[in-house]
Amino acid sequence: MCSRPEPREPLRRVAVVGGTHGNEMSGVYLARHWLRAPGELRRPSFSAVPVLANPAATAACRRYVDCDLNRTFTSAFLTARAHPDDPYEVTRARELNQLLGPKASGQAFDFVLDLHNTTASMGTCLIAESAHNVFAMHLCRHLQLQSPELPCRVFLYQLPGEESYSVSSVAKNGLGLELGPQPQGVLRADLLIRMRALVAAALDFIQLFNQGTAFPAFEMEAYRKVSSVNFPRTEAGELAGMVHPQLQDRDFEPLRPGAPVFQTFSGKDVLYEGEATATPCSSMRPPTTRRALPSSRRRSSRSLCLPCPAGPRPAPAPAPAPAP
Amino acid sequence: MCSRPEPREPLRRVAVVGGTHGNEMSGVYLARHWLRAPGELRRPSFSAVPVLANPAATAACRRYVDCDLNRTFTSAFLTARAHPDDPYEVTRARELNQLLGPKASGQAFDFVLDLHNTTASMGTCLIAESAHNVFAMHLCRHLQLQSPELPCRVFLYQLPGEESYSVSSVAKNGLGLELGPQPQGVLRADLLIRMRALVAAALDFIQLFNQGTAFPAFEMEAYRKVSSVNFPRTEAGELAGMVHPQLQDRDFEPLRPGAPVFQTFSGKDVLYEGEATATPCSSMRPPTTRRALPSSRRRSSRSLCLPCPAGPRPAPAPAPAPAP
């Protein structure tokens, strides 16, 4: 489940998805702009399609209406019989599966790039399923090399044995871009400009691949989740503290056992109880309107040094298609 | 309507209000904490009461449920006959008017301190009705002197002839604290600690006043709104641009005529058309779930140099009350 077949043909059917979470505004407004003016998404060998994934949540400026759309692309949701009481996002996932999939089928889109923001100070984070996705790993490498002065970390989200569930998992290959910090519902020019440049570079990479460019093997650092740390709570379940001032905004910096993680409202420090140094990064699930938490938990991750083989190449180097 | 009678008696009935907007988390979590542990709000001559102003919006982690609570404390809303179809916040405003008022009556609370956050880079902003509120102006001066190294600006929100409408207007005197930047629904330790220190200093000031301390005359800089600038939009009314990268995060820095204010998604700069240099600060009305805008407008303000007379003093210096 972790591995995707490497593409052997040029990628012609590519989508750029914004608004999977309706209050992450860089992708929402880029998708809306490209729906009016799609020229920026054209390359000689393909034209990427802009998609606004969750129109109802976007209209309400909320992460979601009924449930997190980006967790609903599982076979259980996609193949169940439709029912009038289905959550809005389950119905919408089936529509997107028709548009971009069907998932795991030969008719699925070749690539989906999914645009997200976070309130955490994570800079630019590239979210891939697993390191076995050689095409996505080479794309990550390409994006990192575009602006080597900016941190651009790779996070592998899929746990061993877990079924993929994100919108990009519907396509044959995919990648998520997570840029922060940006408040939900707010549009920052610097992040929109950065996201736009990353999308352009990703489409350029696909064009290079389609042209038959060779991508040599490399090693890269990546992160994956090792544990979650719950916020302190009162006996009644209310939030009793916050991320410690010494840890605030220090995503991806080393966290040693015994270092403070939270500070309670009564002034007590809560220390990290892990056995080894970890790399904290804020949960990529920001507070939802349902749970009313400032953040449900902190996520600890650990970096890995990954070897990545030489990139796949399309079998026959195709002649560039005429620009549409 | 702009002027409040100066207090001549010690202030005994004081409230500290959080959660007037349900997704501004510093005040929400401080109010919840103080409802469990109110000792921090005690002073020798009074005990301030913590109030969670909008419990339904706080539970939903939204600015409001039906309408902005902090615009509903007008005589039209407060005196109209109650109706089952009234917006939630109108009903809640009447409850708070019973608890803290009635507005403009002798039974009203002596002072309400109302705690807010903003997503804009406004630092610490003290929001008073008008410079005629001599008590509030002296409190602002006191708060500015606590941490002179931190910007702590005074914003006068009431327009000439306008009826007061905020929760603090229910009391005989009041002040709003607006701290940012903090994403809505997110709790930052640095801002919670800063807000807590400002609340403590405000209660200390009231204690000093109650003890008969003399407050000499002074001059202070303050800001008030001169105009609003609307975001660029498409013909269909959709947002067509964002705050210009050169202006982003530059609240309270001078904006000269001809300087860029917005950048459209097509890359065009929109210039400031005012006739004189102004001081931009982000609208204090962040995006609502109803309007789904990243920010409805930018606000231009101008600084004033205000003389403030010596502070009022209670007529008889009271003996300190025993601590409850």
Image (spheres, coloured by chain):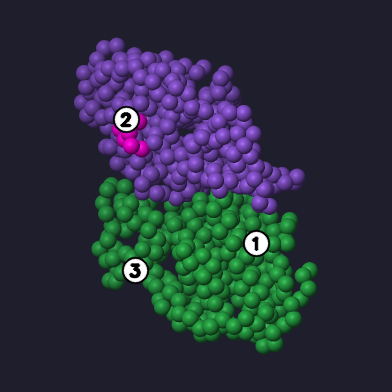
Chain colours: A green, B purple
Give the SS element for disc 2: helix
Q: In the visual, does A66 lie left or right of B309?
A: right
Q: Tell which subunit mark 2 falls on.
A: B
**Label 3 marks which chain's residue?**
A
Q: Is residue B173 above or below residue B270?
A: above
Q: Which residue is mark 3?
A: A278
Q: Which residues are magenta?
A: B143-150
Q: Is residue A150 magenta?
A: no
Question: Are labels 2 and 1 on one chain?
Answer: no
Q: Could you say where residue A264 lies in the image, as x and y percent from the top left?
A: 31, 51
Position of A72 with respect to A303 (left or right) is right
CB contact under 8 Å: marks 3 and 2: no
In space, the residues marked 1 and 3 are separated at their CA atoms by 34 Å
What residue is drawn where x is 51% and y is 17%? B1
Mark 3 residue element: loop
**Residue matched to label 1:** A53
Total numbered circles? 3
Which label sits in the foreground, 3 or 2?
2
Question: In this picture, is B74 found above or below A291?
Answer: above
For residue B145, the mark is: 2
Q: Residue at x 49, y 39 (%)?
A: B251
The residue positioned 40% from the left and 24% from the top of the image is: B220
